[in-house]
Amino acid sequence: MDKIEKQNFIAKRAAKELQNNTIVNLGIGIPTKIPDFLPEGVNVLLHSENGFVGLGPSPTEENLDKTIINAGGIHSTIKAGGYFFDSSVSFGMIRGGHIDLTVLGSLQVDAKGNIANYLIPGKKVPGMGGAMDLLSGGVKRVIVTMEHTAGETPKILEECTLPFTGVGVVNLIITEMGVFRVTPEGIVLEEINSIYTVEEVQNATGAKLIISENLIKI
């Protein structure tokens, strides 16, 4: 799989986690692709932390509005009934517990549900953004979408080596290799991309995986 295929695979699988009548925050990176893969009939309100709800799919040349930009700085669309507001309202929604789910990109996640997604020491990166607020307890569920490795370096670890963004907050991890649930016992491989073997997934992972007895091929 090339990079685009990986990202689309991850976003399409993550879209299946979105449930009817929920408010879902989408972070930067792979999460911004999720609106393009929402299953038909799923009614969710997508929140962009820079100040709007009703986030729609990627624009075409015909409906591109250069004034509509999501939290990742990418041109987006807004659905009928969506609306814009200032950042104080946006973060009030987050801090007030009005977001049911957030889907975030990440640099690392570990077996305890810790996440590091904002800083690589010595490198220029975008910074914390809204992740600190999203992960501080106001959001009911946290999903991480990311490529499984950075080059050949695992991004799912026994313990993050980069500075934490949140501690013990991640519920689910989705990569191009599969779907992983964070539990008190460790990380459970629940679904596996059918082009990989369990051995290949484990070899690409920096934490010991628990293999579900009901492992699903996707």
Image (spheres, grey):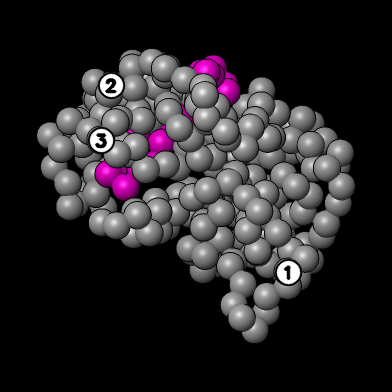
Q: Position of residue 68 (x, y in %)?
A: 74, 64
Give the residues in magenta: 163-180
Instruction: Tell me how far mark 3 sits from mark 2, CA to CA.
Output: 15 Å
Q: Amino acid at mark 3?
A: Glu
Q: Which mark is residue 6?
A: none
Cα separation between marks 1 and 3: 37 Å
Q: Which label belongs to residue 152?
A: 3
User: Which residue shows up at 63% across the image and 58% down it?
Assistant: 74
In screen coordinates, is 55 left or right of 14? Answer: right
Whole-angstrom CA distance, mark 1 to mark 2, is 43 Å
Residue 156, picture quadrant: top left
Crowd tier of the residue under label 1, counting other residues whose Cα lies within 10 Å: few below 14, some 14–19, many 20 or above: few
Q: Which mark is first along the chain, 2 or 3?
A: 3
- Element assignment for label 2: loop
Q: Are marks 1 and 3 in contact (CB under 8 Å)?
A: no
Q: Most prominent secondary structure in the magenta stretch? A: loop
* Residue identifier under label 1: 66
Tag 2: residue type?
Answer: Ala
Chain-order first, disc 1 or disc 3: 1
Q: Residue furthest bottom?
A: 62
* Total numbered circles: 3
- The residue wearing badge 2 is 207
- Residue under the image location 36 percent in, 30 percent down: 155
Q: Is 107 within the magenta? A: no
- Quarter occupied by residue 43: bottom right
- Name the amino acid type tagged 1: Lys
Q: Does residue 13 show up?
A: no
Instruction: Give me the residue at 83% from left, 42% from top.
Output: 87
